[in-house]
């Protein structure tokens, strides 16, 4: 975990320069506590009886915001940034949604890969699309009216990315959310997941579709809007963002590396 800790510590330095070193170290410890608990809780999400999953993970906003779209087979984007409740949100939503699709990064170990795939596709009809194949394979699921569970906030390199601010620092960000929403007229419903360390339980909120998205100001403005939303959520629950990812790995031309 030492390389991961170095990455997380550096991310906190970049994003919270106003905190002193001791405060960032406390935040780092809280983050690894939350991250470790989320890994342990996959055992419940992937193997426990459904009623135990419902006990662990509460859900709000589904009936009023997502269920009406599912009822008429209207595809949509479920926008789920990288917080530690990510797997809890995915499992809980697939319990309610008859069919859905999401992108998936294969694991290097075939046995682990099979375990993760089976866990994430445990409930109902879940289609896992290999992330290496890009966004195009998602289109058949759009045409089939399935919700797309999409993670908008990882650095996949310079190709196809835009540099938009995240905590005031340019971050390579794929503009697929805005592209899909614009091309296919898809509603974008943010999925906000949080973990309560006092109770050990998760709460997942299906929020109303973003208004006027992607708007008329272009892909960069729409993508920056997503990053601002993720930043706002992160400031609300700073220990629960995935700081172990190298979010600032790719730099604009001419800029030095940050790690």
Image: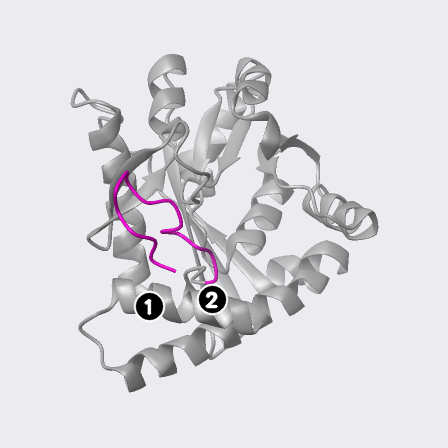
Q: Residue furthest bottom?
A: 22
- Other residues around mark 2 within 10 Å, as few (<14) / some (14–19) / many (≥20): many
The location of residue 254, given as percent across then percent down, is 25, 42
Please report the residue visible at 44 percent of the width from the left and 65 percent of the height from the top: 7
Q: Mark 2 points at which residue?
A: 195
Please report the residue visible at 78 percent of the width from the left and 53 percent of the height from the top: 112
* Residue 122 seen in this snapshot: no
Q: Nearer the viewer, residue 148 or 136?
A: 136
The location of residue 194, given as percent across then percent down, is 43, 61
* Majority secondary structure in the magenta region: loop
117 vs 238, left or right, is right
Circles 1 and 2: CB atoms closer than 8 Å: no
Q: Which of marks 1 and 2 is in front?
A: 1
Please report the residue visible at 35 percent of the width from the left and 30 percent of the height from the top: 175
In which quadrant of the rendered view does residue 88 lie? bottom right
Q: Distance between the residues labelled 1 and 2?
A: 20 Å
**Does residue 143 lie above or below 240 as drawn?**
above
Q: Which of the two labelled residues, at mark 1 and mark 2, occupies the earlier sequence position?
A: 1
**Does residue 84 lie above or below 70 as drawn?**
below
Q: Nearer the viewer, residue 107 or 230?
A: 107
237 vs 135, left or right, is left
In which quadrant of the rendered view does residue 162 lie? top left
Please report the residue visible at 41 percent of the width from the left and 40 percent of the height from the top: 152
199 vs 212, left or right, is right
Q: Mark 1 points at which residue?
A: 12
Which residues are the magenta region?
244-259
């Amino acid at each position: 975990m030492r390389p991961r800790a170095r990455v997380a510590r550096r991310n906190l330095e970049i994003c919270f320069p106003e905190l002193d070193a001791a405060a960032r170290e406390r935040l780092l410890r809280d983050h690894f506590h939350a991250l470790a608990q989320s890994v342990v809780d996959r055992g419940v999400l992937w193997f426990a009886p459904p009623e135990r999953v419902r006990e662990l993970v509460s859900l709000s906003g589904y009936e009023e915001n997502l269920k009406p779209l599912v009822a008429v087979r209207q595809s949509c984007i479920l926008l789920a940034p990288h917080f530690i409740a990510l797997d809890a949100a995915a499992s809980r939503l697939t319990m309610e949604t008859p069919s859905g699709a999401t992108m998936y990064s294969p694991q290097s170990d075939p046995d682990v890969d099979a375990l993760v795939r089976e866990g994430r596709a445990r409930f109902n009809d879940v289609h896992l699309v290999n992330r290496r194949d890009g966004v195009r394979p998602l289109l058949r699921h759009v045409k089939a009216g399935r919700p797309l569970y999409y993670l908008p906030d990882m650095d996949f390199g310079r190709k196809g990315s835009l540099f938009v601010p995240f905590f005031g620092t340019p971050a390579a960000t794929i503009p697929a959310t805005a592209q899909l929403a614009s091309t296919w007229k898809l509603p974008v419903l943010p999925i906000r997941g949080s973990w309560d360390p006092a109770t050990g339980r998760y709460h997942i909120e299906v929020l109303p579709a973003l208004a006027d998205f992607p708007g008329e100001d272009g892909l960069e403005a729409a993508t920056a809007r997503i990053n601002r939303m993720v930043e706002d959520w992160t400031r609300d629950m700073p220990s629960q963002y995935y700081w172990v990812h190298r979010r600032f790995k790719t730099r604009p031309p001419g800029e030095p590396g940050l790690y």
